[in-house]
Amino acid sequence: MLTGAMLAKLRKALNPKSVAIVGASVDQVSVGFGPVYNLLTSSYRGKIYPINPKYDKVLGLKCYPDLRSVGISPDVVIILLNQFAAVDILEEAGKIGASAAVIVAGGFKEVDDSGRALEQRLRKISENYEMPVIGPNTLGFSSFHIGFHSIFWHFDTFPGNVAVISQSGGVGLTIACSLRTLSSGLSHFIGVGNGAVAGFTDYMLALDEDPNVKVFSLFIEGLTDAREFYEVARNISRKKAVVVYKAGKNEEVSKATMTHTGSLTGEYELYRAMFKQAGIVEVDSAWHAAVVSRALGMLDLPQGNRMCAMTFTAGPSIVAMDRLLDAGWIFPDISDEAKKKIRSVIGEKTPVELQNPIDLTGPGFLPQNYSGVLDVLSNEPFDAFFLVWSFHALIRIPIPELEGFVKCTGKPVVLVILANYDEAQPYLEELSRRGICCYLTPEDGAEALNALLARYKIMNRDGLGQNSTPRRLMG
Amino acid sequence: MIIPEHEAKILLSDWGIDVVPTERVDSIMNLKANADYFGFPVVLKLSSSRHSHKTEIGGVVLGLDSYEELEKAYVKLDNLKRDIDPSASIIIEPMIEPGVEFFLGIQRHENFGLVLSFGLGGIFLELVRDISFRLLPASWLDLAEMVEELRSWPKLKEGFRNLPPVDMDELLTFLDKIGDFATKQKGLEEMDLNPVSYVDGKFVVVDARIVKKE
């Protein structure tokens, strides 16, 4: 874990006012091109210093021959050179008083003994100058709320409230792309890489007061200090949601993980227990991480477990119920008065028994009926709503009415639209803009709501169990 | 360093944890007096700081019902002791009535720190492997969630077949005490309590193995 002084520097680096890019290049397929290009095409307002003795200018910016000639101490130095040169430049960055550095190159502990020795040297330099290092073996990081889009790879996202912190650039990008598909943005993207100096705990601590971060979405291959992670995550999860996707669940994968980042993957059962004890929401795929992170970032938590489901086609609510019931949601019946009102909306003759889940059948797909029933339900004592809409190109999705319902209940509402992505896409964007959390499958909708309930339980953890005999806490 | 079973039980007992009473025996006379005190049937065990898996080496003789059986077992263990660990002790314990048997383990893991494992014990430990884990120290609620993770818990709490229902509060009190013991013992590396028997509404440690740092 970083010292207090280094953590302060990391915080500064994640919100930098100046950046030096060593190895900046005008060659489009070089890693030296991406960071300058991405920064120039996003809304970053800080100072950018490309560094490369080969050029006078890079993409119109003045290019410097070396770090020293920049004449200031940048908040972050991004080093895009090979591993050997990178470590030499790190020493220079320390000398000019840079706050932090990113080393993109691989070729350290994940490779061989000489790589391990090189990583040791990197760590020593970082320690000497009290200068945190991000990476090595990483895509780098981006802070989207200040337009600091500095990773070298293509990345389509927009400012949001989910911070993706990933030990693998590829999986991290998969989670980020999935969030984008779901119309959710990011606050930060951080590639932990080998985590030679700064690790998951440091990044979470550096961002734990950041009002732009509501959810930490982590991809973990293995931790070298699980105990430290546990202690930090347990405190952080009381303030912000922590979602974890853990790789290496069986031995085969554990070996792959070892060659990948050079860290031994521990026993999965212990990880699972630790996540649960730390108040972490565990997920089992990159998509699932995105589904859950979106809901946690977008919706308020329920204040209980009473769920109301409404649909006009039964099956989707049944498969969702399977999952919702497992997670601890209950489906109390609707009041007789509400049933009477619903009847008056959908017609006395509709051959259906009204219960929860409410299946409106045929009349339900008329927008005025759908929203009429929503009006009735908003007065019923539920803690969350699961709504299904089956898309039809000729029938309007009652979007304004749904928005009204969401705003007036103040409770978490998940909408599932049964449609193919291409047809639904324009509506998904609009729904998202209007604060309606929408998914395309009942399973995703259910998992989203389950994460909210899990989070509600975590937040109320200390209060739970007080009905049984009060006990002292251990330790 | 392996703490011999009878000493491990003293450590636990001093912490307020129920253990099956144990006496060291060093002669046939002493043996009979203890058997009279406990009442038949009794168990004889070799309690050694070199061999902690005593069943595998033949260091446990169960269900002794008479002086004659007892003497025979004593001679057998005395010979075994001479062969494998002259510094070991022979201990005598009453056989306790069969109850629900649990396994409880403590491990100082290099990555996770102190870890508590708990599950179905005795022969079922390896057969069904119904175990859950928590990092120590653990709160009362952590422990409750740990118990509820066991696949067999819904049946155990209702009383499976002819077994008595297991009381959650009693179980949590026991786990809490063990966790407290483990976090406060200096140099504790490993502890296996297997089985821990649930008899007459109480959890009793039948067999204990403790390993401390040298």
Image (cartoon, coloured by chain):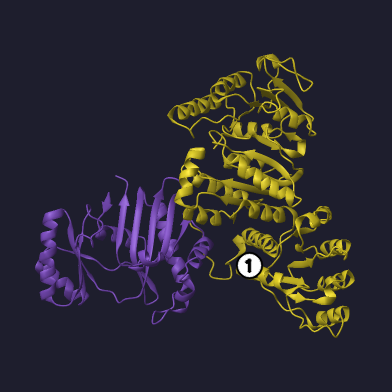
Chain colours: A yellow, B purple
Horizontal placement of B37 versus A320: left or right?
left
In the rendered structure, the answer to whether residue B49 lies left or right of residue A338 reads left
Q: Relative to residue B74, is residue A24 depicted above or below?
A: above
To which residue does mark 1 refer? Answer: A323
Against A346, residue A97 (above or below) is above
Residue A367 shows in the view: yes
**Residue at x-position 59% and y-position 20%:** A89
Residue A224 in sight in this render: no
Q: Is residue A313 left or right of residue B82?
A: right
Residue A337 sits above or below residue B175 on the image: below
- Pick the front one: B83 or A339: A339
> A354 above or below A315?
below
Q: How far across and down, in percent of the image, does residue B61 sit?
A: 19, 68
Residue at x 52% of width, y 60% of height? B142
Q: Amino acid at mark 1?
A: Arg
Residue at 62% from the left image edge and 59% from the top image edge: A458
Classed neighbour count for the residue bearing mark 1: other residues with Cα under 10 Å, few (<14), some (14–19), many (≥20)? some
Give the image location of residue A450, x and y in percent.
65, 63
Q: Position of residue B122 (x, y in %)?
A: 33, 67
Determine which quarter of the picture holds residue A375.
bottom right
